[in-house]
Amino acid sequence: MSRAEDIFQNLIYFGEEAIDEFIINRQSEELFIDFKQAASDGKNFNTLHKDDRRNLSKAISGFGNSEGGVVIWGVECARDYEIGDVAKAKVKVRNVHRFLSWLENAISGCTIPSHNKVRNHIISVDENGDGFVATYIPKSELSPLMTTSNSAIYVRSGSNNVPAPYAVMAGMFGRHPQPNIELKIADKKIEALQNQDEDMFYPNSIDNPPEQYVKISFELQGANISNVIARELFLSAEVKSDGGDYNKVRFSNYSQMEVIAGIEGQLNIITRPELRLPPRGAIKFCNVELVLSPFIEDDFQLEGVIGANLAMPKDFRIYIPKNKLRSFVAKVIRGDEDYNMIMNEFFNDYFRGEF
């Protein structure tokens, strides 16, 4: 998940509380966030106000030609001479559902080419129908995007959308679309097992082997979410710390990949040269099994990266502090909570990556 999408998802999840947090912390406008007051009040017109349309056009061009961003409608800014424009107060958008409709209708006509992946979401609405809207603008695969209002190409620079310098424009026009590989997790499973169920993990030759253990298994996939063919897809993963002598991490079912020898506890795989992954296609990298015993001595940490030729690599990470790991393993072994809830806790709280 990109930084811009992460901000957008937090706004969806936390609602108006997220805006309150921005104001309390004096959040500044930056590379991925823009605060705007809405001029559209519907008094003298029945479409998006020209100022709002201009701001929307610049944002789609600037964020779309850069790394993406979020416009939050309904927040007043104040100038801070040390850190720039900061969130100051809430100024609700009048008739927020109508404003959302005007935004949706305006998007396709804001830039050339149009950016069809822009999304809007009502953050909150009060009893009068007023509230806040977030506009998520992902990085465009069809850049450069030019505004229709003044035929300008913008890029995001700090907290502003600024006209692109000639050198930047030259690079954008000469840049071929690049693949974008997103990490997918499938076939998630968690279970508590007795040692005799699979004693190959803890043979009798080990002194005082654990009687029970937790096994977490899942599949790592790569999805091509771009509009171009992806080649030479790769995954590298390394176990920095397995949390204790009785814990194991296993990578398996990557026979269709070429394996590059690495250090102990590391997996390096890449697709064969003849493989090509079409747009919207997905490929299986490998299966992962985490075997966790109750005897926890250290934090658990696994780090990895996926990508493809010409694509931006994306990191992922599983990190569990040892105290939380002990509690988590004990909870699974006790079996007093639904395994689906526990599994969601694991992947939501401890698995971090750009999904």
Image (cartoon, rainbow, N blue to C red):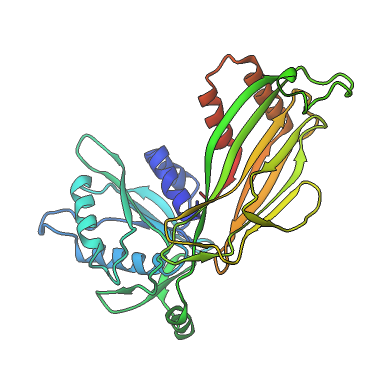
From the viewer's perspective, is 340 left or right of 260? left
Q: Nearer the viewer, residue 261 or 303?
A: 261
Which corner quadrant of the image does residue 78 belong to?
bottom left
- How many discs appear? 0
Which corner quadrant of the image does residue 292 belong to?
top right
From the viewer's perspective, is 191 left or right of 132? right
Q: Where's residue 117, x and y in %?
A: 34, 58
From the viewer's perspective, is 65 left or right of 295? left
Tell me which residue sits at (57%, 63%) in the image.
Answer: 308
Tell me which residue sits at (41%, 59%) in the image.
Answer: 138
From the viewer's perspective, is 133 left or right of 174? left
Q: Nearer the viewer, residue 147 or 44?
A: 147
Q: Where's residue 240, x and y in %?
A: 76, 45
Tell me which residue sits at (71%, 31%) in the image.
Answer: 291
Q: Where's residue 38, x and y in %?
A: 26, 56
The answer to whether 228 is drawn above or below residue 172 in the figure is above
Q: Nearer the viewer, residue 166 or 42?
A: 166
Q: Nearer the viewer, residue 9 or 282?
A: 282
Tell me which residue sits at (52%, 31%) in the image.
Answer: 344
The answer to whether 174 is drawn above or below residue 180 in the figure is below
Q: Where's residue 197, x and y in %?
A: 70, 20
